[in-house]
Image (cartoon, coloured by chain):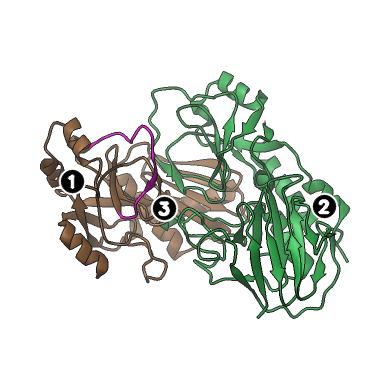
Amino acid sequence: MTEGEQFQPASDHSLLVSFGQQVSLDAHQRVRKLLRLLELKPVPGIRNLHPAYCSLLVEFDPLKLRHAELEAILWSYLGRLETVQLPNPRELEIPTCYGGQFGPDLNDIAALHGMTSAQAIELHASVTYVVYFLGFVPGFAYLGELPQALATPRLASPRRSTPPGSVGIAGNQTGVYPFAVPGGWRLVGRTPVAMFRPDRQNMSFLSIGDQVRFTPISAARFTALENA
Amino acid sequence: MSAIQVQAPGLLTTVQDLGREGFGPIGVSPSGAADPISLRLGNRLVGNVESTAGLEMTLLGGTFLFSQGAILALTGSDFGATLDGATVALGTSFEVAPGQKLRLGSTRSGARSYLCVQGGIAVSPFLGSSSTHILSGLGGFDGRPLREGDLLQIGPATKPFRKRTIGPRLSEHLSSRKILRVTPGPQVDWFSESSLGLFYEATYRVGEQSNRMGLRLEGAPVSPHGGRQMITEGVSLGAIQVPAGGSPIILFVDQQTTGGYPKIANVISADLHRVGQLRPRDEIRFEQVTFEAARSSLIEQEQLLASRESILE
């Protein structure tokens, strides 16, 4: 155990476990380890787990558990955190057609940061991102960290609908919209890869802890992959 | 197998059961009936297990043709139902003969009415539940609200009809109450004493844009202290988050699973079903209770639901 772990009742049916107040890979590793431990040895009465950057929200059945009981159980889990072996991260590629109709905000982002669109694409595709967690809607992965030179606030007013596969930027995060949903992330491109498919073994293309790179592709390649 | 023919879908009618648990790590919210107690009771009235899938109607109900007959119950809010023109009682099981038509109108009380049928609505489950998640188009009937012409299959119904009615004490307990009990949210200390005072004194109006994802509230804005940067974290069912503008939002069954706004409070488990019956323009207030009181209320409510007098035969 290290310092910084805190428990806080978030509701009468949930407990928030915080690993500090900073987004860091270390805090995130601990979130993943606790998540893994709870998946391997489930606690009766726990209903759901919501991992995030540096916290894990544990939802439970209040008829079966109290906050204090759950806290005691989780302390014992935290004591075993160092023994948890996380699987080697999967390395995944997201082929992305940048700009044009697929990335309507690319030019604005480039202009905002005083670079060309080609430079913005190169920068976005230059780093390996970590899947910090999935949230918002099924299969939506929060990927970090975006190179600081590309960090851009959300749109002032969100789009009513964002095409599935759209690759967006918000602050120092990037992510891919799995569904046509309203969204305020700035769109730089689109991937033909389905982020969430209920008829697939791994419904969600991405899982927490995956390492991800975006690979620029042409519009022709996009169409070919989409129809594959 | 027997079927229900949708002649008019109503404003927003979806297949719901008690939702799916345990898929937070892939971003899947629970969904399920917005007023789960009404669905549970409706199922008991027709002889189903409580978690069987039924239809959730919103503000305006549909028209349904039963070409092979069925055993039904309506629970939740009164949508002025008629069977071939004759009034149907809410909270009582009834039998429908082949070819009869059930018609529902606009609500006369809360937001949602539930139609339960013996055998349940048969759809292929998604992640262990028949519930519809509208935003992602997953689960339920084709992942979407019903449309005119849809044909819903009814699961095997083998039990004889028995007339059952919700008992008076339970009916009274479920009647509308416009005070929601809450416990403090994880960021409650981000709000000043005066903001918190305002939050608990003010009357809030449920906004027109409210839906199964969240209820937007209009009324006294309660801004958190400036200068603190919220790190996105998991959100609980019934969390009351406060975006920059200060207008609170109650996150509900189809909610986003994580969020980046501070949460001032959380509706207690025993009152979540009441949130499901709130209509746009309804006025509500919040009352803070302790976690222990919240738990006691839930235990009492479950005892009442389990008691012999909850359903009369």
> Which-is-in-front pick, marks 3 and 2?
2
Residues marked 1 and 2, same chain: no
Say which colour chain B has: green
Q: Residue drawn 58% across and 33% down?
A: B217
Real-space Cα separation, disc 1 to disc 3, in angstroms: 39 Å
What number is the disc on residue B195?
none
**Left or right of A146: which side holds A32?**
right
Tell me the magenta residue range: A151-165
**What is the crowding at mark 2: few (fewer than 14 residues within 10 Å), some, or many (at least 20)?**
some
Residue B86, x across and y down, in percent: 85, 61
Which is more N-terminal, label 3 or label 1?
Answer: 3
Asked whether residue A162 is drawn in magenta, I would say yes
> In the image, which lettered chain appears brown?
A
Q: Amino acid at mark 3?
A: Gly
Q: Residue A124 got which mark?
A: 1
Q: Report in which chain the residue with disc 3 lies.
A: A
The residue where tag 2 is placed is: B170
Look at mark 3 in the image and give the residue it sits on: A79
Is there a contact, CB below 8 Å, between mark 1 and mark 3? no
* Residue B52 visible in this rendered orientation of the protein: no
Instruction: Classify mark 2: helix, strand or loop.
Output: helix
Frontmost residue, B14 versus B104: B104
**In this orientation, which residue lies closer to the viewer: B150 or A204?**
B150
Q: Chain of mark 2?
A: B
Which quadrant holds the C terminus of chain B?
A: bottom right
Residue drawn where x is 62% and y is 22% of the image: B197
Measured as percent of width and height from the top left, residue B146 is found at: 58, 61
Identify which residue is drawn at 36% across, 40% down.
A184
